[in-house]
Structures are given as C-alpha cells and as structure tokens.
Image: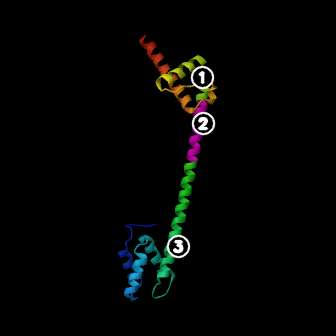
Amino acid sequence: MTRGMPKTWKDNAALINGLWPTVSWTDQEKQLWHKELSSSNQDWVHRALQVVAKKYSASKPTLKWVLTEIRNIKYEYESVTRSNLKEIADEKERELEQMRIQVEKERQDMIGLLQDLPPQMVEAAAKNVRAVVGLTIDTDQDISEWSSLALGCTVVALERMATENERNRHNG
C-alpha cells in the first residue's frame, strides 16, 4: 500500500498546503485537522488527501471528506487483510491435511511391516522399547490398534536390533 518511507503528519501537513495552497486556515481549523488526523495512520491520511483532491473540486476541502476517505481506505485494507488471512488459513489447512495423510500412510506402513514379522520378533522389539524408553506395549493387542508412538518405537527398536545383529556378525 505504501511506497517508500512511511508518511508522517509533517509530510501530510505539507501535502495539504501543497494541494490547496490558496486556502487560508484558521487556528481552530488547523488544531481540529491536526487533532483528527495526526493520530491516524499517516499513509492512509496521505492517500485520503490525494483522493479528496481528485474527487472534489471545491477550493477548500472538508475534514469530513478526508475522514470518509480514511474510513474507506481502512475498510479496504481490513478487507484485503481478512481475505489474505483466510487464504493463509486455507493453505495451512491444506498443508495440515497433507501431513495427516502422510502420517496415516506412515502409520499403515509401520502396521504392515510389524504384521509381516514373526510375533516373537515384534515381542522382542516391544520389550526393548520398554527397557530403553519405559513404554509398555501390549503385544496381545492387535498391532493395528497400537498408538503411533508404540508403532514408531517398535520399528526403531527393530532397526536398532538389526544394526546390533549386523555389527555382532562382523565382529564375531
């Protein structure tokens, strides 16, 4: 929305005097405009002043016109922001769904791997998990009902046991 450096009240006061150089402002008008506009987003004030200068042909702008344009700019900004936030949220939801799908695929792969192994090997890995991690796995329960943590720990224990067996073969 803004190009270059952010605008300041001083920039916008200079813009007002530049856009309407022949206007004579009373002290009360200057104070009112300053009070109403100096605490607003100065980039929005800058744009609103430019819109008012283009939209109205009066020799002197009204504060009401500028405030209305600031509200319009704010509404536009908030609408775009809401739209962007919705797009970001939708994208994150799609990413989360892809992660859920990936986790479920990996879970099914682990279940398939463990179901294809001899029960004694799975039980030995489950005992290893209990010894190393402290997680007790009920090997009487169907593997498909195990938690993802139990599945993952058991697969890691099997990999660790296979690595140790391989090392023992080379050293023994």
Task: Count residues near mark 1 (Cα–Cα under 10 Å), then give few for <14, some for 14-19, many for 20+.
Answer: some
Q: CA distance from mark 3 to mark 1?
A: 66 Å
Q: What residue is pinned by disc 2?
A: 104
Q: What residue is pinned by disc 1?
A: 139
Q: CA distance from mark 3 to mark 2?
A: 47 Å
- Residue kind at label 3, given as amino acid type: Asn
Q: Position of residue 47 (x, y in %)?
A: 46, 73
Taking depth in this image into account, of 21 and 147 the one nearest to the observer is 147
- Residue kind at label 1, given as amino acid type: Thr
Q: What's the residue at 50%, 26% (across, down)?
A: 156
Q: Quadrant of residue 6?
A: bottom left
Q: What residue is pinned by disc 3?
A: 72
How are the colours assigned in the image? rainbow
Q: The residue tagged with tag 2: helix, strand or loop?
A: helix
Establish if 67 lies above or below 133. Answer: below
Q: What's the residue at 61%, 32% (across, down)?
A: 108
Q: Main secondary structure of the magenta part?
A: helix
Q: Quadrant of residue 13?
A: bottom left
Of the two numbered discs 2 and 1 on the same chain, state the one appearing first in sequence: 2
Task: Count residues near mark 3 (Cα–Cα under 10 Å), then give few for <14, some for 14-19, many for 20+.
Answer: some
Q: Which residues are magenta?
A: 94-109
* Quadrant location, the C terminus: top left
Q: The residue tagged with tag 3: helix, strand or loop?
A: helix
- Residue kind at label 2, given as amino acid type: Glu
Of the two numbered discs 3 and 1 on the same chain, state the one appearing first in sequence: 3
Q: CA distance from mark 2 to mark 1?
A: 21 Å
Q: Position of residue 154 (x, y in %)?
A: 54, 25
**In the drawing, does residue 163 fall left or right of residue 115?**
left
Of the two numbered discs 3 and 2 on the same chain, state the one appearing first in sequence: 3
Instruction: Based on the picture, tell me whether residue 98 belongs to the magenta stretch.
Output: yes
Q: Position of residue 155 (x, y in %)?
A: 53, 26
Q: How many marks?
A: 3
